[in-house]
Image (cartoon, rainbow, N blue to C red):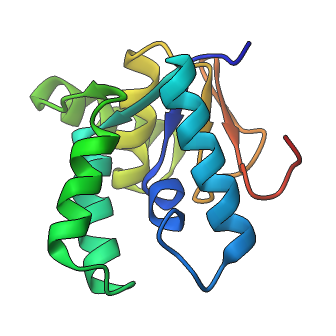
């Protein structure tokens, strides 16, 4: 059984990246398993970043990217508010990471996730019980 896990934007973007077929297959597999088994979490920040990256960097038509945002939002969705922004500022200062990464960490921690799937932070790094995992560098 998989543990409650948070998806960073790059995982969702890879679901559309035909130039990285291995990462695309892994991202699609992870998102589908999370959806079926109910352990996947993401935030409004991730959905916004996904839309921008998919349409601008990968050329996904806006209507398709919009539909995918609707589908991704069927996972457990964290809505970021002022309390999260202030908490992210504290995480940024404490751990010396970028603000947007800190907001992801904040959302993942507040939603009681054990794993954060991302390429943007150091694999194996921990934030008060939240483990960073690069889903594209390790099997399974």
The image quadrant where one finds the N terminus is top right
Q: Whole-percent x and y of residue 126?
A: 68, 30
Please, which residue is most extreme toward the right here?
A: 139
Question: Where is residue 25, by image quadrant?
Answer: bottom right
**In the picture provided, is 124 more to the left or to the right than 61?**
right
Q: Whole-percent x and y of residue 42?
A: 38, 35
Please, which residue is most extreme toward the left here?
A: 82
Judge whether 51 appears above or below 122 on screen: below
Q: Whole-percent x and y of residue 14?
A: 54, 66
Residue at (31%, 79%) from the top-left corner? 60
The image quadrant where one finds the C terminus is top right
**In the picture provided, is 42 more to the left or to the right than 89?**
right
Q: As rendered, which of 31 and 42 lies closer to the eye? A: 31
**In the picture provided, is 64 more to the left or to the right than 113?**
left
Judge whether 70 appears above or below 98 on screen: above
Residue at (32%, 61%) from the top-left corner? 50
Residue at (34%, 53%) from the top-left corner? 100
Report the number of numbered marks: 0
Q: Whole-percent x and y of residue 59?
A: 32, 87
Judge whether 53 appears above or below 67 on screen: below
Question: Where is residue 132, by image quadrant?
Answer: top right
Judge whether 134 appears above or below 42 on screen: below
Residue at (36%, 85%) from the top-left corner? 57
């Amino acid at each position: 059984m998989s543990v409650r896990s948070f998806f960073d934007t790059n995982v969702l973007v890879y679901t559309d990246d035909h130039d990285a077929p291995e990462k695309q297959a892994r991202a699609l597999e992870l998102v589908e398993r999370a959806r079926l088994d109910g352990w996947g979490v993401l935030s409004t920040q991730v959905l916004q970043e996904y839309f921008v990256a998919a349409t601008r960097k990968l050329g996904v038509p806006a209507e398709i990217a919009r539909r995918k945002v609707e589908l991704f939002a069927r996972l457990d969705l964290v809505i970021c508010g002022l309390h999260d922004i202030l908490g992210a500022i504290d995480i940024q200062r404490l751990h010396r990471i970028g603000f947007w990464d800190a907001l992801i960490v904040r959302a993942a921690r507040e939603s009681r996730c054990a794993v954060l799937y991302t390429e943007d932070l150091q694999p194996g790094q921990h934030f008060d019980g939240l483990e960073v995992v690069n889903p594209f560098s390790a099997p399974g």
